[in-house]
Image (cartoon, grey):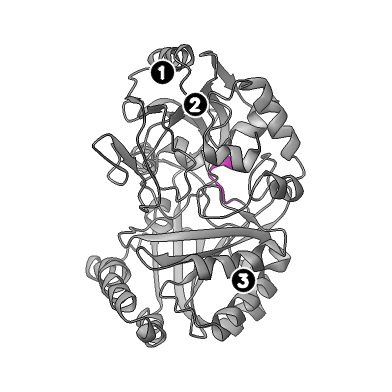
Amino acid sequence: MGSSASAGNGIWRNWGGTVAVRPAREVAPASVDELAAAVRRAAEDGLPVKAVGTGHSFTSIAATDGLLIRPQLLTGIRDIDRAAGTVTVEAGTPLKRLNLALAREGLSLANMGDIMEQTVSGAISTGTHGTGRDSASIAAQIRGLELVTADGAVLTCSDKENPDVFAAARIGLGALGIITAVTFAVEPVFLLTAREEPMPFDRVCAEFDQLHAENEHFEFYWFPHTGNTNTKRNNRSAGPERPVHPLRGWVDDEFLSNGVFQVANWVGRAAPAAIPAIARISSRALSARSYTDIPYKVFTSPRRVRFVEMEYAVPREALVETLRELKAMVDRSPLRVSFPVEVRTAPADDITLSTASGRDTAYIAVHMFKGTPYQGYFTAAERIFTAREGRPHWGKIHTRDAGYFSRVYPRFGEFTALRDRLDPERRFRNDYLRRVLGA
């Protein structure tokens, strides 16, 4: 079981503490055949079916009161094809384990998100992404999928085989079937040089287009109640390797980003009036640093401070005005926000319900410390994002429904038609899918 989602008294809870359900039964199949048999048995008993990863989604996308499938036995690398530049991995493999195994083989994904606790299938099914000028989402690096459909059949798809399924199932929300294996494009492991430096908010906004164009991976964090940001640029490097010094890494990543940050959030939760002062201090505590290492050591970082999150994808050209409006809203409101706002980018892709489907995209993520009231902030932010046809991350908090999605996703009908064909009886249904895809 993932270290992050928990089950006690038969109740399953997600990492963020926003969802708790009691499934009628749970299985942890050890093979694709066992999984298919469990799906067929659930159909005979009229139970809905959901597979769950490590519970890193804040929405109830994986929740079920029917059959809960835990994929922890479906892990490991199935096949490496060096000539084709692909690796096939079992769906329950945690990204952390995939990254380590690939590194041992001298291989790497081209890009990844910043957390690596999730399972491969959970991460792709919700559209997990990093930041990138040329690549960002994990799903866009998929070359093939194997899934168990509602009738218990095993279906394989790629751009050559069942291409209509492939177009949708790479980010399938768990609605089209249960993914059992994923084939990713990989490349020989390479080095990235990360450059992290503070930069005033106004300067980042003024130079955003240039910063995006000149860097393979650009992102920044803005600290609400301040005019400060911390920027991060990752670019491929000829080396040599210059990892973060262990002590400096501990101070920056554990002490400041997890330890002190946790305490600062506790103080802020107890005394919200102190938050702007804390934000000014913490946004200055991060100094510039540069280091060179293999990709997963640069892209990913530990996240131990629990939070809730909303993230919206807006057209990239609308980013700066959207962000300025968000800042103005926070500045004139009584809100006290102790978590930085994260900004990343992605190029347009061809995946039906990808947040970057058909458009160059910028992501704005707002967070609140777990246990603080987040509704006021998230509601105000969501109003700003949806005014620009924003598309919410499928695994993060939002209030949108199928009516809204059919307007902001040109290919929405293509996805729902495929769902009608693959799962006519809605074996993989739950309340979340009913809301976002319609009945």
The stretch drawn in magenta includes residue 261: no
The circle drawn on residue 211 is 3
- The residue located at (47%, 60%) in the rendering is 309
Identify the image quadrant of residue 253. bottom left
Badge 1 element: helix
The span from disc 2 to disc 3 (Cα, nearest Å) is: 39 Å
Q: Does any portion of residue 180 appear in the rendered image?
A: no
> Along the horizontal axis of the image, is 415 left or right of 366?
right
Q: Find residue 178 and name its label.
A: 2
Which of the two discs, 2 and 3, labels the residue nearer the N terminus? 2
Q: CA distance from mark 1 to mark 3?
A: 46 Å
Q: Is residue 137 magenta?
A: yes
The residue mark sitting in front, 1 or 3, is 1
The boundaries of the magenta stretch are 135-141
Graded by Cα atoms within 10 Å as few (under 14), some (14 to 19) or many (20 or more), the crowding at tag 3 reads some
Q: Quadrant of residue 267?
A: bottom left
Q: Nearer the viewer, residue 296 or 346?
A: 346
Which of disc 1 and disc 2 is earlier in sequence? 1
Q: CA distance from mark 2 to mark 1?
A: 9 Å
- Decide which of tag 1 and tag 3 comes sooner along the chain: 1
The C terminus sits in image quarter: top right
Q: Residues within 10 Å of mark 1 (few under 14, many from 20)?
A: many
Quarter of the image with the N terminus is top left
Q: Residue 322, how many percent across, how many down? A: 66, 71
Q: Which residue is mark 1?
A: 35
Position above or below: 91 against 153: below
Tags 1 and 3 touching, CB below 8 Å: no
The residue located at (51%, 30%) in the rendering is 183
Q: Position of residue 91 (x, y in %)?
A: 43, 30
